[in-house]
Image (tube, rainbow, N blue to C red):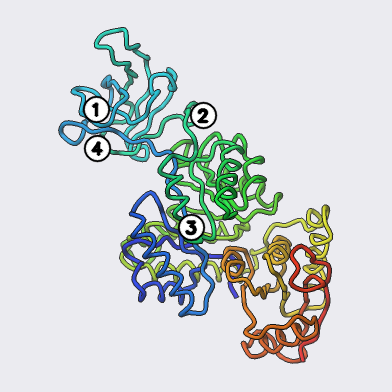
Amino acid sequence: MRRAKMVCTIGPASESPEMLDALCAAGMDVARLNFSHGTHEEHLARLNAVRAAGERNRRPIAILQDLCGPKIRAGKMAAGFFMANAGETVDLVEGGTEPIPGVIPIGYEGLAEDVKVGDGILVDDGRVVFRVQRIVPALEGDGIARVRTLVEQGGRVQSKAGVFLPSRHLRIDALTEKDKVDLEFGLSHGVDYVGLSFVRATRDVEMLRDICEAFGRPTPIVAKIETPGAIEDLDGIIRAADAVMVARGDLAVEMAPEQVPVLQKRILAVARRHRRPVIVATEMLQSMTKSTRPTRAEASDVANAIFDGTDAVMLSGETASGDHPAIVAGMMARIIQMAEGSPFFAPPIDRLEIGKTSIAESIARNACDIAEEVKAKLIVCFTHSGDTARLVSKGRPTVPIIAFSPVEQTRRRLALVWGVQPRVLNERATVEEEVINLATAYLIAQGLAVPGERVVLVYGAPLNVKGTTNVVRVHEVR
């Protein structure tokens, strides 16, 4: 039973019912909707299609709404592009709606005030690089403030190309007006997670949480770590968020590519300390956008993320716009299973770090230890909010976790959590022993356990009351 979870981005290549069924069969746990692209109508159709596929395949699938964030782009250019040759001096100016001859317009107010001499400005994911030489005030010349740069790495700058300015200087909110409109749309349709792009400080996460709560839909937040500011405030951001994403694409543009592997391990370590799920993302199986086989480096990349203890790995363009999304997802699932089945798989965890603040955490820690000591087949959680299963997951037990919950959204949200298989009992009961008997019958019927095997039960007494996890019990299947 695979422990690490798989996030698949849904796009034109994967939105059909047939392809979504194939992705479910391959093991998709979370469907990511990228709000940097597409209309609300397209996203609603995809959201409904994912929900329908989950029901058809009897598989809880979480929906992750990934907000665009404050993307800065080059403005319009007369020829549709500007050819920047290495070694030349080129002026950048504020603008975006109308072409300005001889310069590159940038769609960001405050450009000349917010960049500093010596800063690097990267265009098109770093394919073209400018180095700031001088800030030319508006009073000099034609009344337009200019950022005079030296082209360090030349190339064609297209209209609307992505522009990376040093994020530590920017005076823009993590949530744009577009993001707020998109967020209201997502919350109104019950997304299970919200991804916050270009997080720079703890306050960005807190602002998003306040908006979600004001809307009446408190929703778990995935903080995307992709800026130098986020690295500087890493501890606070991870503590404030519900989960984190190692967004390696933009992180590698804003920082040196050779730093990314070290930063990935650091982010995982801090998230583990705060017991927050981690998604490792970007170009994990990028060559499979066209190919039916990954490169050896890509296979190793996925496997090493598993060895490092990530909760989930993510596919982006591979499933959103690639030639064969289901084949890619199947390959990723097999790499995960191979890594988890190897003798090198030992998720790094210090269980003594769990159980220091509450009875529930102490129960979760002991459930993991007891399951190993009595050679239990499973840990079975009965949970309303999902918190019990999340706490047990953080202990990284060596046996699978089955989480029974009567709440559909809880089951979907648990789809992201390492090692947890969310399930529902078709019959309802409120008496403790009746619920345990129903669960035992389910385990036998599904082939998850056989009579005579032991399982460790974790729940709260009385049942179905949030926040009362206080029982750990060894149960023999009969």
Q: Is residue 127 left or right of residue 375?
A: left
Q: Label 2: how many residues lie within 10 Å, few (<14), some (14-19) or many (20+)?
A: some
User: How far apart are the alpha carbons under marks 4 and 3?
Assistant: 36 Å
Q: Position of residue 359 (x, y in %)?
A: 84, 60
Q: Give the labeled residue for mark 3.
A: 188
Q: Choose the circle earlier in sequence order: 1 or 2.
A: 1
| Mark number displayed over residue 85 | 1
Q: Amino acid at mark 2?
A: Arg
Helix, strand or loop under label 1: loop
Residue ID at (49%, 53%): 281
Measured Cα–Cα span from mark 3 to mark 2: 33 Å
**Which residue corresponds to mark 2?**
168
Of labels 3 and 2, earlier in sequence is 2
Q: Amino acid at mark 4?
A: Gln
Residue 203 versus residue 54 in the image, above or below:
above
- In front: 431, or 4? 431
Foreground tag (1 vs 3): 3
Residue type at mark 3 is Ser
